[in-house]
Image (cartoon, coloured by chain):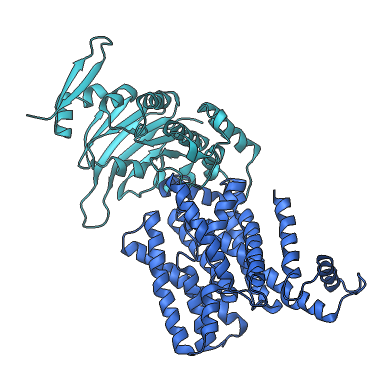
Chain colours: A cyan, B blue
Amino acid sequence: MSAGHLAVKDLCWRPGKNQPFLLHPVSFEISAGRVLGVVGPNGAGKSTLLRMIYHYQKPTSGQILVDRQDLWGMASKVAARKVAAVLQEQPGAFGLSVRDIVALGRTPHRSGLSSESAKDAQIIEAAIARMQLEALVARDFDTLSGGERQRVMVARALAQQPQVLVMDEPTNHLDIRHQLEILSLIRSLGLTIVVSLHDLNMAADVCDAILLLKDGRCQGFGSADDVLSEQLVSDTFSVTAQRQVLSVSQNQHLTFHLPT
Amino acid sequence: MIGAGVLLLLFSISVAISVGAVSVPLHTVWSILINQVAPGTIEQDWSKGRAAIVWDIRFPRALLACLVGAGLAVVGSSLQAVTRNPLADPHLLGISSGAAFGAIMVLMHTGMFWGLITVPLFAFGGALAATLLVLAVSQFAAATSADRLILAGVAVSFIVMSLANVLIFLGDPRATHTVVFWMLGGLGLAQWSHLVFPLSVLAVCGAYIWLNARKLNAMTVGDETASTLGIPVARFRLIIFVVGALITGVMVAFSGMIGFVGLMVPHIVRLLVGGDYARVIPASALFGAIYLLWSDIIARTIMAPEDMPIGIVTGLVGGMFFVWLLRRRAR
């Protein structure tokens, strides 16, 4: 498994001809193994951008290049070996075990009729071990807690052996402890990661670069220090944002108030 | 597990052949069957009449029960995956009503102008039309969420069923027997010459569904996730619906509408073998066959010598199961 270089060029999307763009042309690049945080208010176009990167929604125009190969120029099965996604949708009550779910990650690597090979099994075991799910392999997915479910979905994505991993709001509905666990996990995966986050301080902590969106337009792209400035955050989110240095850790921290 | 299931299936078939207005001992049943396949292997100590009851009437009926039960259960389990709704079932989704409509059209109005295959063909056409109608209605009503798809199916089911009733009403005012057969199902029409249709459709379509078990697993997670695994989600769902309509159509053509088999069997199977569709599909086929065999045994014996419609049995059991399922899901 190796991280890939991700380049997005003039990518935009609208639902149909003569309809307004939900995402205006955006371009950015992140080098292999880096974490990009996508932030912005609701309806900013974060999901639209992510959906195009995980090969669900075809761009109106523009390109997504993984290691210089055009993602939308390849078959879905090939694209599925490049980009994996951990989304908010979760398996229904169908009694799939943890191992069944993780094994799904091998789908794009197997041809129609072949059964699971020894190599597949090895990769699945490795993904399970990586997420420390050994004790849960036989459990029914429905019976897991939110944090455990999230780890299973990450293991499933790892079994896919992608170069790029997309995560949509991975900290949603998790308690603080599990949020922190997921974030430290993101840092440790060694993959190129595109993650959408609501919490700006979390994004500043965990991401190498930040893409700030509003109304389908890019408001800024770069390091957290540059992009998450008081001015830009205040404008984008229609709040009064203040940057403070925390007295104990000396870390930068954003606080927000309604504008008066 | 599968071995035990096959043994249970063979035992159930034997019992189904053995019981009835004239009871035939199990060993005689097997002797007759073996003698039919390889004449002269066992010395004949039974009357010709018994041989005829076993071979010409009860055995094809038992095999039809197996095929219909297996087919409906396989359709139910695969529809549950692609709609991501554990309540999906060819009956509830209106597919069975469409098939009944097509079959009634042929039997009471147009006649079998293409020979024996006309009925299953029209039943398939009706099932397919009802399926597409359900998908169209759910699009129209913007009811793409799993629960509302079922409601669209129920709505279509009512509409198609009343249209079918119009056909019956127009056909023959004394046709109450036909009405009962199509509404409540029955295996009494089983004949050797008919079995080839459900058998071949189930073999081909069932194998196709089984080979796509991995995709069905992925579909239970969600459309977007399945798509990131390289699966063409919309096309695959449509194919499964069409294949499901094909199986349902041919089953309904020979047995009427038998409800709740496709809803209930996959749930019980998941409790036994887990949720992996590579196991759920064959186990559903096996268990569906066994379930319908026993339903038919009950339907034939409970008011003997009257043949009670099998749909009364599966409806009663399935309805109670539905309540249990709601209760389980509520917790």
Drawn side of residue B86 relative to residue A194, left or right: right
Q: Image check: A82 left or right of B192?
A: left
Spot occupied by residue B84 in the image (x, y as percentages of width and height): 45, 52
Residue situated in front as seen by the camera: B124 or A35 = B124
State the residue at coordinates (49%, 78%): B102
Q: Which of the pair A48/B309 is nearer the observer?
A: B309
Q: Is residue A75 visible?
A: no
Q: Nearer the viewer, residue B312 or B288?
A: B312
B160 w.r.t. B149: above or below: below
Residue beneath the point at 40% across and 45% down: A55
Q: Position of residue B263 (x, y in %)?
A: 52, 59
Residue sticking out furthest to the left: A260
Q: Is residue B170 above or below residue A195?
A: below
Outermost residue on the top side: it is A248
Q: Residue A143: x and y, percent?
A: 49, 38
Residue drawn where x is 43% and y is 25% of the image: A185
Residue occupying the far front of the picture:
B303
Answer yes or no: is residue A90 visible.
Answer: yes
Report the number of discs: 0
Name the spot of residue B272 as percent of width and height, x first. 62, 47
Quadrant of the drawing holding the C terminus of chain A:
top left
Q: Residue at x 53, y 62 (%)?
A: B260
